[in-house]
Image (cartoon, helix red, strand yellow):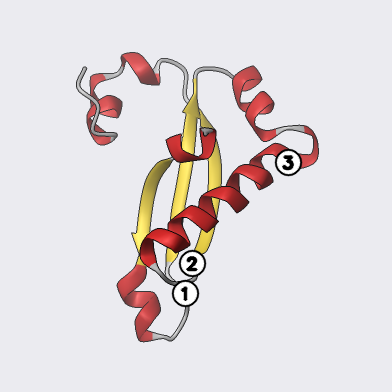
Amino acid sequence: NYYEKFLLDRYAGTLASVYGKPPCVEVGDRFENRRQAVLTIGAGGRKLREIGVKARAGIERLLEKPVFLQTHVRVQPGWNRDARALDQLGIES
């Protein structure tokens, strides 16, 4: 499923637990061009919302607790040929 391929950008669980709030998980995907991003987002954001709902359910099963999930997409031309960007994602260039 597509939602399993979203990249974890940030997990802020420790600070959230101090304040009694669910941990914040930030995930996203990068695209070469705007057209690819628009196809993923869908009309009115419906497709991205669906991806987020499925991703949150999977993350909550994994962590065994509720989470606040933030999803986003980025248009970053050339990211898949940028050694630094690939390294940040843990992908060998």
Image location (x, y in percent) of residue 50 = 67, 45
Whether residue 48 sits left or right of residue 92 in the image: it is: right
Whether residue 93 sits left or right of residue 44 in the image: it is: left
Please name the residue that numbered disc 3 is placed on: 45
- At horizontal 45% and vertical 64% (from top left) the residue drawn is 24
Q: Quadrant of residue 87?
A: top left
- At horizontal 48% and vertical 53% (from top left) the residue drawn is 58
* Mark 2: amino acid: Val
* Mark 3: amino acid: Gly
Check disc 1: other Cα within 10 Å, few if <14, some if 14-19, many if 20+. some
Mark carried by residue 35: none
Q: Quadrant of residue 62?
A: bottom left
User: 46 or 82: nearer the eye?
Assistant: 46
User: 81 or 4: nearer the eye?
Assistant: 4
Q: Earlier in the sequence, mark 3 or mark 2?
A: 3
Image location (x, y in percent) of residue 86 = 28, 26
Mark 3 and mark 2: Cα distance apart in space: 21 Å
Circles 1, 2 touching at the beta carbon (< 8 Å): yes
Vertical position of residue 35 compared to residue 38: above or below: above
- At horizontal 44% and vertical 35% (from top left) the residue drawn is 5
Please name the residue that numbered disc 1 is placed on: 22
Image location (x, y in percent) of residue 72 = 55, 43
Check disc 3: other Cα within 10 Å, few if <14, some if 14-19, many if 20+. few
* Mark 1: amino acid: Pro
Mark carried by residue 67: 2
